[in-house]
Image (cartoon, grey):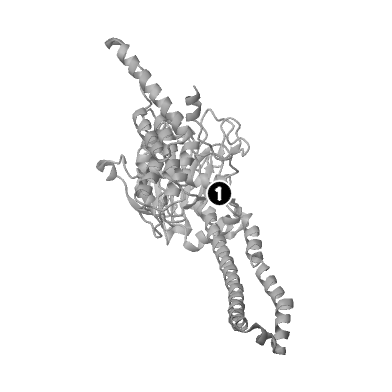
């Protein structure tokens, strides 16, 4: 049993702190400026050290010439009274000055700046959050490790590579989550890059240590044994690997004996190894959701497509839109999803973003058990809430939504502005409260969320679609547009086909803002029908 204890001896990293930067690309851009400032400070320090060394070098060269001459005829040299005086002066005063110059610490300014800036640095959980985001993107968009490592992503402007050490760190993050599938993938990528001759601070022994254990955990005992032997070829004294080797051989011998002694009808009852692959998770529609994020599995038929139209919409003869009607496009039929084009200007977008940026905080979700807001791993973004009275632009946007939808926004929630982080997403969810969540919006006193209005405030280079897994719909971000749909039927019953998700952002920066409109105030604007599902 000692061998079994040895096999799980790989150390885990220290516990992590509260997440922050990785949940918002917008706030991460501030880190670029922070790092640039530190680089400038570092270059100033290097220049100061170079100036100091140049002074010392000149002093040394001068004294080298002087002592070379003096040592040829010491008596004659000091026989000159000026030389004698200068020798006394140099040894008594100037060498002390040189000593002070050598001992002078030129790093004070840099260290002081670094200390100040460090309080704004990401922490361990930011690093881990960004690593998990890469794993999430890998699965959602069917990317192999080599593609990610070489930076061959669609829509990239600034290509970047992962080193073997980076791949090793990604594998370690997966390992700490007991995600041995991704541990194996990234440790193998690190090993490939080392085999190709990449110079790295990590060695093959460390990689093989994690890799063999990850493979063993997935039930591939033969491969685990092979990798362990490869490790021992590099480091014959590796204690854990030696223990693992004995343990693997013991298990294999035991399985061989069982197979020999078992009869044919009993052989199919033996324990099967764990199946390799991504672990089963809590999201039943994961496969459907990820396919839609890739633009696959969209269920719009040509016959239904013919019934979707573009039109000019004047908001039911609203004076604001009679002369300049809004451009409307049908994105989907059931549920009906409408896109409004050129509905928010670039100037308005910048004002909304500027108002939101200082207030961005980790986005929350309603906890169905407590009815309170809480953070969740399935929503990776930061958000801020803007009231109409704060700025005329926000007020104008709110009224535009009311004019175009015909719904009263006085009972709506404030405008929520969201910026998605690395691999930012919001997994499939409902905007409205279900029957098992009667207290979800009790504090607001405005009823359920009858409809959703969603502004796209940026283009996204790759990923970031809004998808509806129940009906197979994908809506792609386009700056300056907005989409609108009803969450409830006119009867007040929830429309379960509106379950939707924000796909992970693969490349780019996604900004959105949304308005959740509530039931109260809509009694005469959207009257009930006799049918429950209309």
* Nearest to the observer: residue 258 or residue 305: 258
Residue 450 point in image, percent of width and height: 50, 40
**Count of marks placed on residues:** 1
The image shows residue 95 at horizontal and vertical percentages of 69, 75
Residue 59 in which image quadrant: bottom right
Query: Percent from the top left, x then y, of residue 527?
Result: 48, 38
SS type, badge 1? strand
Closer to the camera in the image, 213 or 327: 213
Task: State the image quarter where residue 358 is shown.
Answer: bottom right
Query: Does 415 sit above or below residue 232?
Result: below
Residue 145 higher or lower than 226, as above or below:
below
Q: Residues within 10 Å of mark 1 (few under 14, many from 20)?
A: many
Q: Residue furthest left?
A: 302
Q: Which residue is mark 1?
A: 383
> Which residue occupies 70% across, 88% down?
79
Nearest the eye: 227 or 167: 227
Quick check: 223 above or below 264? Answer: below
Residue depicted at x 70% and y 79%: 90
Q: Is residue 322 left or right of residue 75?
A: left
Residue 286 against residue 257 in the figure, above or below = below
Position of residue 319 measured from the top left corner of the image (x, y, whole percent): 47, 58
Residue 70 in the figure: left or right of residue 215: right
């Amino acid at each position: 049993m000692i061998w079994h204890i040895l096999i799980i001896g790989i150390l885990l990293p220290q516990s992590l702190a509260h997440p922050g930067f990785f949940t918002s690309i917008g706030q991460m851009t501030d880190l670029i400026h922070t790092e640039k400032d530190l680089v400038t400070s570092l270059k100033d320090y290097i220049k100061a050290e170079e100036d100091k060394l140049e002074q010392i070098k000149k002093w040394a060269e001068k004294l080298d010439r002087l002592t070379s001459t003096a040592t040829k005829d010491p008596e004659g040299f000091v026989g000159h009274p000026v030389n004698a005086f200068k020798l006394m002066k140099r040894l008594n005063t100037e060498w002390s000055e040189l000593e002070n110059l050598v001992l002078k610490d030129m790093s004070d300014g840099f260290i002081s700046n670094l200390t100040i800036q460090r309080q704004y640095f990401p922490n361990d959980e930011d690093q881990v959050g960004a690593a998990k985001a890469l794993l999430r993107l890998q699965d959602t968009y069917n990317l192999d490790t080599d593609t990610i490592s070489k930076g061959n992503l669609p829509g990239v402007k600034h290509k970047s590579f992962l080193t073997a050490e980076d791949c090793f760190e990604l594998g370690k993050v997966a390992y700490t989550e007991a995600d041995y599938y991704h541990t194996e993938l990234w440790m193998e990528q690190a090993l490939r890059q080392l085999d190709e001759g990449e110079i790295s601070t990590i060695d093959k022994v460390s990689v093989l240590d994690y890799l063999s254990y990850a493979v063993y955990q997935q039930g591939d005992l033969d491969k685990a044994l092979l990798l362990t032997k490869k490790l021992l070829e590099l480091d014959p004294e590796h204690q854990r690997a030696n223990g693992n080797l004995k343990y693997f051989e013991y298990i294999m011998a035991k399985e061989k004996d069982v197979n020999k002694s078992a009869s044919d009808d009993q052989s199919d009852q033996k324990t099967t190894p764990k199946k390799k692959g991504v672990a089963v998770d809590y999201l039943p529609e994961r496969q459907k959701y990820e396919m839609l994020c890739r633009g696959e599995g969209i269920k719009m038929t040509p016959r239904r497509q013919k019934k979707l139209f573009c039109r000019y919409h004047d908001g039911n003869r609203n004076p604001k839109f009679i002369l300049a009607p809004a451009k409307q496009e049908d994105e989907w039929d059931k549920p009906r999803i409408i896109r409004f084009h050129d509905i928010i200007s670039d100037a308005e977008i910048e004002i909304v973003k500027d108002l939101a940026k200082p207030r961005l905080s980790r986005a929350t979700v309603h906890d169905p058990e407590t009815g309170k807001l809480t953070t969740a791993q399935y929503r990776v973004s930061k958000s801020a809430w803007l009231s109409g009275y704060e700025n005329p632009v926000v007020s104008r946007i709110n009224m535009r939504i009311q004019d175009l939808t015909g719904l009263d926004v006085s009972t709506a929630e404030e405008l929520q502005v969201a910026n998605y982080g690395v691999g930012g997403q919001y997994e499939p969810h409902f905007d409205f409260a279900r029957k098992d969540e009667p207290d979800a919006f009790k504090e607001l006193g405005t009823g359920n969320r009858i409809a959703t209005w969603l502004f796209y405030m940026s283009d996204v280079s790759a990923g970031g679609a809004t998808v509806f897994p129940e009906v197979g719909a994908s809506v792609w971000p386009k700056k300056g547009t907005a989409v609108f749909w009803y969450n409830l039927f006119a009867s007040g019953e929830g429309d379960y086909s509106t379950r939707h998700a924000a796909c992970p952002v693969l490349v780019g920066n996604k900004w959105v803002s949304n308005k959740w409109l509530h039931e109260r105030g809509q009694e005469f604007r959207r009257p009930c029908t006799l049918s429950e599902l209309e």
